[in-house]
């Protein structure tokens, strides 16, 4: 079968191409096809690992340790595609590979050019994923907006692939905006122009997904079809849904998937959408509420903690509970006048997520202390676990100056310090402890109860670790080391004694949570929060 589906965007950015691509993936999987997903990012960074969360949102990590665009997180939540380094392509990677080949003399004296050398490298990378015999369809999302300078080589590669594969094997889906001007009048002109722009680079879209606040009328769809040479059936209203998890159903109801299958000459199969319907039901009509405070430092940009918000939502789905999230900028808690009692009033659980750099750290430590002393369920992720250890060393062991050497190099009590292998590293890109590692959980711990297994595997992205020299001291003061690496060398999780539910993990469980299979730690955290709410 081996079909290619290209997803591009027009008019402006942030239209939700990632959700559109993911939803098409979910629908194809619901019909029993095996799907792969590729994200193309036309920036020059080799990967997203060195980009600020404020610039680019969360960095999503794959099992094989690639630091990728957060859209891969969407793919991972909507589909079961096995995502790895190969699923994320950037301009930086493509040029780096071509230049390295040129230096190695592989082009045999020829002039190295954007066409065909860069475009060939792009095509080769797409096909490396798409040619897997187990994959029926590969959805390739091209980041940015058609018309941007950066995306030109990618669109050219996509045009060539459509030409080489034939229209029956490679389809184009363009996501555009249909705004309403004051008075509510719907405007189709931006979409007409956006499609022209795509046609100019030689691509005729097969389907259009029109983003708008409200569902679009058939008249509007017909008009757009007329102006763009896209069949009316292929003009889909991508209206704002109450939850992103409803988008696959919205597309299904407009028969986008059967239309695309017809275009690709693939016989349609029964669609099994029960689990998506259940997800939407749980998110939009929960039977109870739970209120979680997330105390972090990148609070101004929602996308910085994208997978955390989603995983919390999934934890709620598991208990039919709607989530109310209180975003607390940790710097706010640093003011000596900050009234934690007031800030955490009515909160049923506190989560401290990952992060880098000193700002807001003391506030996180205060939040952890508040959760420990007031017996509020606590989930600490990566930095959030290190915070737990610092706080414990200060308040319980009595080392007032305990710190991580990330924030205080000279502390006499470095309870969190650089991993041995990190001490020699000079370059920033791709050099953290990255990707999936196994860990063993301790019998009788919260984490063991959550997973139900001794062996677990989770993804990491950090440079610092609990200092092994103080492990005994922590345990002597009853902090439970509830998971370690299989050789026992690194602390992977800890828990407070005499606490209703507290888990700090050195890894990032949020990356593996799906709405259709909530992650066990988030599920248990929300369960504990619900029982705290009840109590
Ligand atoms: N800054 C910490 C470290 O590098 C935590 C990283 C994180 O939270 N992802 O270890």
Image: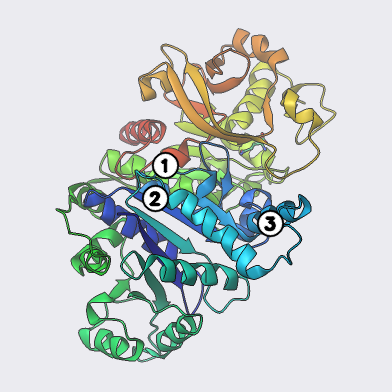
| Image location of residue 426, percent across then percent down | 81, 38
Helix, strand or loop under label 3: helix
**Number of numbered tags placed on the structure image:** 3
Q: Nearer the viewer, mark 2 or mark 3?
A: 3
Could you tell me how far apart the alpha carbons at marks 3 and 1 are, in whole angstroms?
Answer: 26 Å
Question: Which mark sits nearer the N-terminus, 2 or 1?
Answer: 2
Crowding at dot 3, Cα within 10 Å, few <14 / some 14-19 / many 20+, comes out as: many
Image vertical order of residue 185 relative to residue 62, above or below: below
Crowding at dot 2, Cα within 10 Å, few <14 / some 14-19 / many 20+, comes out as: many
Viewport quadrant of the C terminus: top left
Disc 3 target residue: 98
Viewport quadrant of the N terminus: bottom left
Task: Tell me: is circle 3 under 8 Å from ligand 1.
Answer: no
Q: Specify the quarter for ligand 1.
A: top right
> Residue 169, located in which quarter of the rendered image?
bottom left
Helix, strand or loop under label 2: strand
Q: Is any atom of residue 238 visible in this view?
A: yes
């Amino acid at each position: 079968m081996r079909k290619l589906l290209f997803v591009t965007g027009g008019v402006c950015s942030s239209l939700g191409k990632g959700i559109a691509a993911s939803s098409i993936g979910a629908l194809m999987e619901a019909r029993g096809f095996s799907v792969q997903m590729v994200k193309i990012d036309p920036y020059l960074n080799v990967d997203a690992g060195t980009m600020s969360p404020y610039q680019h949102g969360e960095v999503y990590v794959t099992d094989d340790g690639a630091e990728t665009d957060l859209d891969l997180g969407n793919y991972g939540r909507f589909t079961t595609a096995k995502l790895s380094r190969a699923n994320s392509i950037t301009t930086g990677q493509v040029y780096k590979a071509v230049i390295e080949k040129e230096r190695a003399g592989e082009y045999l004296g020829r002039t190295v050019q954007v066409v065909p050398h860069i475009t060939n490298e792009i095509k080769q990378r797409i096909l490396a994923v798409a040619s897997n015999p187990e994959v029926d369809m590969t959805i390739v999302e091209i980041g940015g907006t058609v018309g941007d300078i950066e995306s030109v080589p990618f669109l050219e590669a996509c045009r060539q692939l459509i030409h080489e594969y034939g229209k029956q094997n490679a389809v184009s889906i363009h996501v555009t905006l249909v705004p309403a001007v004051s008075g509510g009048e719907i405007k189709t002109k931006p979409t007409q122009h956006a499609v022209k722009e795509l046609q100019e680079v030689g691509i005729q879209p097969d389907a259009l997904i029109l983003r708008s606040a409200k569902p679009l009328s058939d008249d509007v769809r017909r008009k757009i079809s007329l102006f763009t040479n896209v069949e009316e059936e292929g003009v889909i209203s991508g209206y704002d849904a109450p939850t992103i998890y409803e988008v696959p159903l919205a597309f299904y109801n407009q028969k986008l998937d059967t239309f695309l299958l017809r275009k690709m000459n693939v016989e349609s199969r029964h669609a099994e959408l029960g689990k998506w319907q259940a997800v939407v039901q749980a998110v939009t009509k929960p039977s109870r509420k739970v209120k979680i405070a997330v105390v972090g430092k990148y609070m101004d940009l929602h996308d910085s903690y994208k997978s955390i918000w989603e995983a919390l939502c999934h934890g709620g789905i598991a208990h039919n509970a709607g989530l109310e999230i209180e975003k607390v900028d940790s710097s706010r808690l640093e003011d000596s006048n900050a009234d934690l009692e007031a800030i955490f009033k009515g909160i049923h659980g506190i989560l401290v997520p990952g992060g880098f750099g000193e700002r807001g750290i003391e506030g996180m430590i205060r939040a952890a202390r508040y959760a420990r002393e007031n017996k509020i369920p606590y989930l600490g992720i990566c930095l959030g676990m290190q915070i737990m250890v610092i706080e414990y060393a200060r308040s319980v062991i009595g080392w007032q100056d305990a710190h991580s050497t990330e924030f205080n190099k000279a502390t006499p009590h470095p309870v969190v310090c650089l991993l041995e292998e990190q001490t020699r590293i000079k370059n920033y890109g791709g050099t953290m402890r990255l990707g999936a590692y196994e860990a063993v959980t301790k019998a009788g711990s919260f984490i063991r109860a959550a997973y139900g297994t001794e062996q677990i595997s989770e993804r990491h992205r950090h440079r610092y670790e609990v200092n092994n020299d103080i492990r005994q001291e922590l345990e002597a003061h009853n902090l439970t080391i509830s998971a370690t690496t299989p050789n026992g060398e690194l602390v992977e999780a800890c828990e407070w004694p005499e606490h209703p539910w507290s888990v700090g993990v050195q890894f990032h469980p949020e990356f593996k949570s799906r709405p259709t299979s909530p992650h066990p730690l988030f599920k248990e955290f929300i369960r504990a929060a619900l029982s705290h709410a009840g109590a």
